[in-house]
Structures are given as C-alpha cells and as structure tokens.
C-alpha cells in the first residue's frame, strides 16, 4: 500500500453540473458548494493516507465551460459569455478555476500536515485550454478539413 500511487478524483464536476441544472447562482456555487466539495476531497485523501497510502495524485477540475454538453445546454446568444480564444463558456470555466485554486490551497495545507506523504496536484485545466487555443501545436488535424 505504501509504495502504490493512488489517483484520487477528479471530483466535483458532476456536483457543479447538478447545481447549474438546479439554477444555483455563480455566487452560491462558489460559496456553498466548492468549499464542501473540496472538504470532502481532503477528507477522502486523509482517509486513504490513514490506511497507509503515501503517494496520491489529485486531479483538478476540467474546464467545464468547454465540455460539449455544457456548451449545448447553456448556449447563449450573448457573445460576451464566451471566451473568444477557446469558444468556451466563461462562467463555467470560472467555477472550475475557483475550485482548482481552493483545492490547491487545501492540498498544500494537507501536505504540511502530512509530511510523510507525497500529494501531487494534477492540472487537467491548463492543458485542455492550451489545446483549444493552439491545436496545431499538438499534431495533425483530423476531420472534415483534415
């Protein structure tokens, strides 16, 4: 158990999707849901460490405003709702960024409390945004224009 590497997550994405469907405000998601989700993640990691795990990778949230179902369900006529460089919905990406920032702070605090373990944050957000902004950087293009 001690030599194994555990991946804990990605957690929170579905919780936020349900909040949007329930028409929670951006402020309510950030103030009421994000802290609880992150607290649950930290509690789960602590339980895993208590069982003897020593190496844990914790992924952050993906840019939810770029996911096709989000783009479809929450399409907007207002072009300012979209990031012009990616085509993603800014509001949903803002929550993912906020979640990731709160998670990183909590993971840093946990790492200080548990110096015998190795807790690694895995950034899922930035690579996907980079891919959307610079697709040619990542290789051959496929599809209708491929």
Image (cartoon, helix red, strand yellow):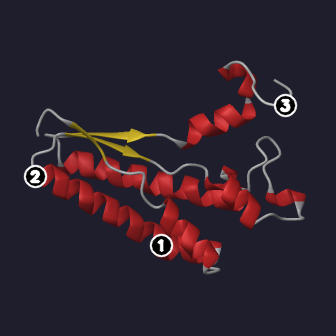
**Crowd rating for badge 3 (residues with CA inside 10 Å; few <14, some 14–19, many 20+):** few
Q: CA distance from mark 3 to mark 2?
A: 51 Å
Q: Is residue 10 above or below residue 28?
A: above
Name the residue rendered at 62%, 76% in the picture: 21
| Front-lying residue, 141 or 62 | 141
- Mark nearest the camera among 1 and 3 is 3
Name the residue rendered at 72%, 28% in the picture: 135
**Crowd rating for badge 1 (residues with CA inside 10 Å; few <14, some 14–19, many 20+):** some
Label 1 vs 3, first from the N-terminus: 1
Which label was assigned to residue 144?
3
* 125 sits left or right of 59 in the view: right
Label 1: element kind: helix
Residue 39 in the image, given as x and y percentages of width and height:
34, 65
Where residue 131 sits, quadrant-wise, is top right
Q: Is residue 142 above or below residue 87?
A: above
Which label was assigned to residue 51?
2
- Mark nearest the camera among 1 and 2 is 2
Q: CA distance from mark 1 to mark 2?
A: 27 Å
Residue 4 in the image, given as x and y percentages of width and height:
18, 35
Name the residue rendered at 62%, 73% in the picture: 20
Where residue 119 sits, quadrant-wise, is top left
| Front-lying residue, 83 or 132 | 132
- Mark nearest the camera among 3 and 2 is 3
* 123 sits left or right of 87 in the view: left
Q: Which residue is mark 1?
A: 33
């Amino acid at each position: 158990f001690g030599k194994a590497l555990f991946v804990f997550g990605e957690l929170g994405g579905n919780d936020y999707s349900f909040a949007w469907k329930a028409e929670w405000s951006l402020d309510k998601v950030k103030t009421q849901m994000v802290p609880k989700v992150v607290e649950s993640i930290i509690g789960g990691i602590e339980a895993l460490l208590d069982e003897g795990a020593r190496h844990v990778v914790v992924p952050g949230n993906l840019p939810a405003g770029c996911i096709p179902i989000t783009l479809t369900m929450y399409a907007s006529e207002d072009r300012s709702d979209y990031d012009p460089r990616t085509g993603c919905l800014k509001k949903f990406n803002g929550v993912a960024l906020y979640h990731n920032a709160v998670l990183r702070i909590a993971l840093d605090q946990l790492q200080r409390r548990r110096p015998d373990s190795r807790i690694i944050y895995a950034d899922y957000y930035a690579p996907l945004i980079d891919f959307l902004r610079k697709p040619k950087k990542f290789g051959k293009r496929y599809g209708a224009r491929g």
